[in-house]
């Protein structure tokens, strides 16, 4: 009985899905997936419509087509690149008077002896003077 | 089917150059990021490179404000990060051992992690100012795109 109901509801969704596309996901339970896995996957693949899987009436995860996954991945990667550029644009100007070759001699500054570096020694004594 | 990999692995020096406006490479690196964006590449930093950049900023500058700012940017998920797992660290360890045998004293295990991450993810190149990576048969970004 339950199987018939699920099949019918999936068929109904299938018809509707062509119009709603990605913005209106299919709502499905984890039990329905277990019983109708093949149909659900076919539906998602053929319509591109995502399915939101709920457990005890609470939405848990979404299943999307591989095509949508690639698009989402690209969007996320693009967002990362843009925010990296934004990071460079928003970088604060603290006027530290620190070394200008930090990126070129990173290992030395990060792990080397601080005393070897002139500008840091200068800074240290300035701080010491304040104290 | 997934398309061709567009990943570039970023080193700590790139994060430092981007975050530290007084750095001599700040503008150049920013321009290269713009070019990479135009070519649809994506930069991912091994988490060790993020830690290295934060450490360098804190140690080299007389105040910790900039390192705190970069740390905050990490918390805000501003850039792509690849977390080092056992397989990457093991590969890095092998690269480091080989590098030590060939007499390279300058390069740290963190450089080996960057290279191992690039090899493991089959990245298109490495974004760094360090020319050592070129000798390891991984192209640098500067050679991948026209500046």
Image (cartoon, coloured by chain):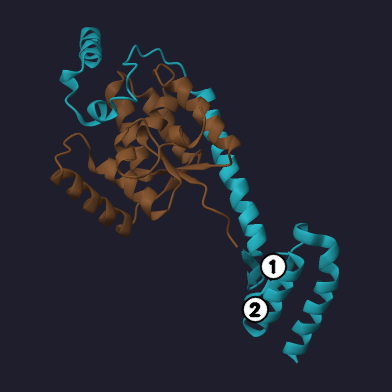
Chain colours: A cyan, B brown
Which residue is identified by label 1? Answer: A51
Residue count near mark 2 (Cα–Cα under 10 Å), binned few <14, some 14–19, many ≥20: some
Which element carries disc 2, helix, strand or loop? Answer: helix
Dot 1 and dot 2 residues touching (CB under 8 Å): yes
B133 up-or-down from A93: above or below: below
**Residue A130 coordinates in the image, percent (x, y):** 25, 8
The residue that appears at 45% across and 16% down in the rendered structure is: A93
What is the total number of numbered labels drawn onto the structure image?
Answer: 2
Using the image, name the chain to which the residue with label 2 belongs. Answer: A
Displayed quadrant of residue B39 = top right
Whole-percent x and y of residue A25?
74, 63
* In this view, B125 is above or below B89: above
From the top left corner, tell me how far across and down residue B1 is, in percent. Answer: 60, 63
Which is more toward the observer, B137 or B105?
Answer: B137
Task: From the viewer's side, name the closer residue of A107 and A97.
Answer: A107
Who's the residue at 19% across and 22% down the image?
A114
* Residue B4 in sight in this render: yes
Residue lying furthest bottom in this view?
A1
Query: What's the mark number on residue B94?
Result: none
């Amino acid at each position: 009985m339950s199987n018939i109901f699920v099949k019918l509801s999936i068929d109904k969704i299938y018809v509707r899905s062509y119009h709603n596309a990605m913005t209106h996901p299919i709502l499905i339970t984890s039990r329905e997936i277990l019983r109708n896995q093949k149909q659900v996957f076919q539906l998602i693949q053929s319509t591109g419509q995502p399915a939101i899987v709920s457990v005890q009436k609470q939405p848990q995860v979404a299943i999307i087509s591989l095509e949508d996954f690639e698009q989402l991945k690209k969007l996320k990667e693009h967002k990362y690149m843009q925010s990296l550029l934004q990071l460079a644009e928003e970088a604060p100007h603290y006027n530290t008077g620190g070394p200008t070759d930090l990126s070129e001699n990173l290992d030395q500054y990060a792990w080397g002896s601080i005393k070897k570096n002139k500008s840091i020694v200068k800074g240290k004594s300035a701080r010491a003077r304040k104290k | 089917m997934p398309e061709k990999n567009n990943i570039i692995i970023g080193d700590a020096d790139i994060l430092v150059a981007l975050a530290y406006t007084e750095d001599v490479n700040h503008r150049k690196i920013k321009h290269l990021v713009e070019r990479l964006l135009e070519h649809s590449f994506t930069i991912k930093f091994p988490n060790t490179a993020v830690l290295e950049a934060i450490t360098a900023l804190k140690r080299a500058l007389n105040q910790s404000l900039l390192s705190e700012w970069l740390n905050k940017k990490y918390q805000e998920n501003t850039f792509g990060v690849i977390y080092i797992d056992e397989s990457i660290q093991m590969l890095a360890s092998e690269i480091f051992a080989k590098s030590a045998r060939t007499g390279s004293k300058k390069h740290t295990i963190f450089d080996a992690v960057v290279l191992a991450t690039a090899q493991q993810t089959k990245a298109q190149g490495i974004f760094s100012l360090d020319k050592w990576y070129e000798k390891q048969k991984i192209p640098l970004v500067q050679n991948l795109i026209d500046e």
